[in-house]
Image (cartoon, rainbow, N blue to C red):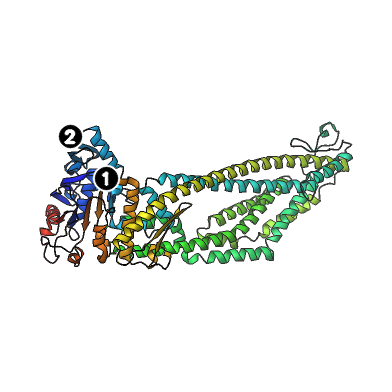
């Protein structure tokens, strides 16, 4: 890819002016907090890719390169903030000087310039993941399987797979919901038809027998079949008779009886027990309602890790180490998994209550239509309000949150005394209607039956269409999921082999037989690691935090090697090496084929640094032992020496 020969930084982040002679070799930047290590990392990332990952991307809020890339004293002069680098491009066998200004980060100035040079830097711009910070290591190890799949696939440039899978799943879920709603509408139309026909079920023999009995009263020829377009009232238009009644007395009485029966059942023992079970399930969630909201905002917790800068929690500004913050966030996300189980149980219990409410709402509609001819306006409003209340209650139970509203709805399910009185008066009004003659009753029967048969046919056709659409959507989703999972399994099989090999090299002294498993499934990526031959467990289960960090580094290197192959020759590691436990840092340097040939590292000096790098070399600042030398004769730039960068920043701020 490239090798960096020199780097010049001006008025950029916390650095006023700094030049580094890197000589195409691996190098490390050492220093305590505030000495400018991250500024060097940001500068190198910026000049090569045109971005600064800690200022861009999800969760960065109002941070931006233009506003926060320049030194704080040059924040209104972005044109004076720039980074220059001289890089060696092996594929072109030439050195190129490049420069980017914060004012125009997308513009790369190169000398000498050519389409081939621009192509090299376009590749770098397409792979900002060559820069890895310590806080990002944890993404690949301790996050839950769904988020791990997103992070890994994003790094492998396979995130469109997950985006499409999610969209197909949403389409499938929406289609299933639409099919269920259409089926409910069909069932309600069927129930209305069965009541109008006064039959046990809507089978062809029962329909024909009941219809022909009325047709004989009217002297009409019987129907032998009833096809998709057949009419129960065929020939009826030519028959003489009195005016059609505004209310079919028999059907109105049957509709009202069905509604009153539903209202009475909701006051019975069975429904009360069902509501009590739902209430108990919801009450279990009361103590965790705030976490229930976090189920929807789970990405917020993950983003907190991305925003961590090494000193304080980015959410509450409380001093926290990375390990402390990680532990807190993982505990919260683990609690969310438990809450999800409780929520699913509550929704399951509420489902039966919702179904009963929806069924009663459907029974209210024909009764309301009857009431329009027989009730006063204020009485009719009682029925309309009842139907609306049922719909609203069903929606509230479906939403679940806020929980107090859900509990209140469960308490309000008992029908009002006012409704019961109105239904009683309506029953009297229907009973007071004059009895029709046999011929008028038969005619009204066929007319009402045909109207409801047509409604049933329309609802049934809509249900069939919705069901077919749901079946197709599910088949597409299942096929895509199976195919993409199989392809990802092959990818992860290659990655897990290289990952385990790298980890064995780093930890050869005690985990020489280490193995790992990466298992994709429906948008999730399971990650199991061997714990000394005792089985496969999540990385955070038994391994130390230092081992977990080295796993994150090894997985990152394995993923990058899969993504770029032999083209992975350059990486910027920000405080990554020192996150590996002290006894195995030397193993990282020795992991041939893992760390790319040209690596930039920044880290804090540690008391045991001399033990990590066992060699003779130039002395570092007081109290910090030898300046570390990178493998292959790499260089170390100690920013603690005279606190050069930090002092420049502070003096400029005075």
Q: Position of residue 221 (x, y in %)?
A: 87, 35
Classed neighbour count for the residue bearing mark 1: other residues with Cα under 10 Å, few (<14), some (14–19), many (≥20): many
- Of 210 and 52, nearer the camera is 52
**So how many labels did they put on this image?**
2
Q: Nearer the viewer, mark 1 or mark 2?
A: 2
Q: Quadrant of residue 525?
A: bottom left
Circle 1 — which element? loop
Residue 112 shows which numbered tag?
2
The answer to whether the residue labelled 1 contacts the one labelled 2, judged by CB atoms less than 8 Å apart, is: no
- Of 440 and 336, nearer the camera is 336
x 61%, y 46%: residue: 179
- Of 93 and 197, nearer the camera is 93
Q: Quadrant of the C terminus?
A: bottom left
Residue 220 vs 640, above or below: the answer is above
Q: Position of residue 572 (x, y in %)?
A: 24, 51
Q: Which residue in the structure is indicated by mark 1?
A: 51
Among numbered discs 1 and 2, the one appearing first in the sequence: 1
Q: Residue furthest top?
A: 238
| Residue 252 seen | yes
Q: Whole-Å distance between the Cαs marked 1 and 2?
A: 22 Å
In the visual, does 23 lie left or right of 566?
Answer: left
Circle 2 — which element? loop
Classed neighbour count for the residue bearing mark 2: other residues with Cα under 10 Å, few (<14), some (14–19), many (≥20): few
In the visual, does 513 lie left or right of 600?
Answer: right
In the visual, does 522 lie left or right of 40?
Answer: right
Q: Quadrant of residue 449?
A: top right
| Residue 66 seen | no
Q: Position of residue 553 (x, y in %)?
A: 31, 57
Residue 498 vs 4, above or below: the answer is below
Q: Position of residue 323 (x, y in %)?
A: 31, 64
């Amino acid at each position: 890819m490239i090798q960096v020969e020199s780097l010049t930084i001006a008025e950029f982040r916390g650095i006023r002016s700094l030049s580094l002679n890197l000589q195409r070799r691996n190098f490390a930047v050492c220093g305590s907090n505030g000495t400018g290590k991250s500024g060097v990392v940001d500068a190198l990332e910026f000049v090569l890719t045109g971005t600064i990952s800690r200022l861009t991307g999800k969760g960065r809020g109002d941070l931006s390169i233009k506003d926060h890339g320049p030194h704080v004293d040059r924040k209104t002069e972005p044109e004076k903030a720039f980074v220059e680098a001289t890089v060696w491009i092996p594929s072109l066998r030439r050195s190129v000087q490049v420069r980017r200004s914060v004012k125009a980060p997308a513009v790369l100035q190169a000398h000498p310039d050519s389409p081939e040079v621009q192509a090299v830097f376009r590749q770098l711009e397409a792979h900002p993941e060559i820069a890895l910070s310590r806080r990002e290591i944890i993404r690949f190890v301790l996050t839950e399987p769904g988020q791990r799949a997103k992070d890994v696939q994003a790094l492998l440039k396979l995130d469109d797979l997950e985006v499409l899978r999610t969209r197909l799943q949403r389409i499938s879920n929406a289609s299933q919901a639409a099919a269920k709603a259409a089926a409910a509408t069909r069932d309600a139309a069927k129930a209305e038809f069965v009541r109008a026909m006064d039959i046990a079920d809507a089978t062809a023999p029962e329909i024909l027998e009941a219809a022909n009995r009325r047709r004989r009263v009217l002297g009409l020829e019987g129907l032998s079949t009833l096809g998709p377009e057949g009419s129960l009232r065929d020939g009826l238009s030519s028959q003489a008779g009195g005016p059609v009644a505004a209310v079919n007395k028999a059907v109105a009485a049957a509709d009202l009886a069905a509604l009153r029966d539903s209202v009475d059942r909701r006051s019975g023992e069975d429904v009360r027990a069902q509501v009590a079970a739902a209430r108990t399930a919801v009450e279990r969630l009361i103590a965790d309602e705030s976490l229930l909201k976090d189920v929807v905002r789970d990405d917020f917790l993950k983003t907190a890790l991305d925003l961590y800068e090494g000193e304080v929690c980015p959410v509450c500004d409380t001093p926290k180490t990375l390990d402390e913050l990680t532990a807190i966030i993982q505990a919260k996300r683990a609690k969310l998994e438990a809450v999800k189980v409780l929520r699913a149980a509550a929704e399951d219990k509420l489902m039966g209550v919702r179904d009963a409410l929806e069924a009663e709402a459907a029974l209210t509609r024909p009764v309301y239509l009857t009431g329009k001819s027989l009730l006063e306006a204020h009485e009719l409003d009682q029925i309309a309000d009842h139907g609306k209340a049922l719909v609203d209650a069903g929606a509230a139970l479906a939403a679940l949150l806020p929980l107090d509203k859900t509990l209140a709805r469960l308490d309000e399910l008992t029908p009002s005394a006012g409704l019961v009185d109105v239904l009683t008066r309506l029953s009297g009004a229907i009973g007071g209607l004059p009895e029709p003659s046999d011929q008028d009753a038969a005619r009204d029967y066929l007319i009402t039956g045909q109207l409801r048969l047509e409604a049933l046919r329309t609802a049934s056709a809509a249900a069939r269409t919705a069901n077919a659409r749901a079946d197709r959507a599910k088949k597409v989703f299942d096929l895509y999921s199976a195919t993409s999972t199989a392809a990802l399994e092959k990818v992860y099989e290659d990655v897990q082999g290289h990952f385990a090999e790298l980890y064995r090299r780093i930890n050869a002294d005690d985990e020489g037989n280490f193995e790992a498993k990466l298992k994709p499934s429906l948008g999730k990526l399971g990650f199991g690691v061997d714990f000394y031959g005792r089985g496969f467990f999540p990385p955070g289960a038994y391994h130390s935090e230092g081992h977990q960090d080295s796993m994150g580094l090894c997985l990152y290197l394995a993923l990058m090697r899969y993504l770029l192959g032999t083209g992975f020759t350059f990486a910027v590691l920000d405080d990554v090496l020192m996150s590996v436990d002290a006894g195995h840092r030397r193993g990282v340097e020795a992991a041939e084929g893992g760390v790319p040939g040209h690596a930039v590292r920044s880290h804090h000096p540690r008391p045991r640094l001399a033990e990590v790098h066992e060699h003779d070399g130039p002395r570092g600042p007081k109290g910090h032992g030898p300046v570390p030398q990178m493998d292959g004769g790499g260089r170390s730039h100690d920013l603690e020496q005279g606190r050069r960068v930090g002092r420049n920043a502070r003096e400029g701020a005075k």
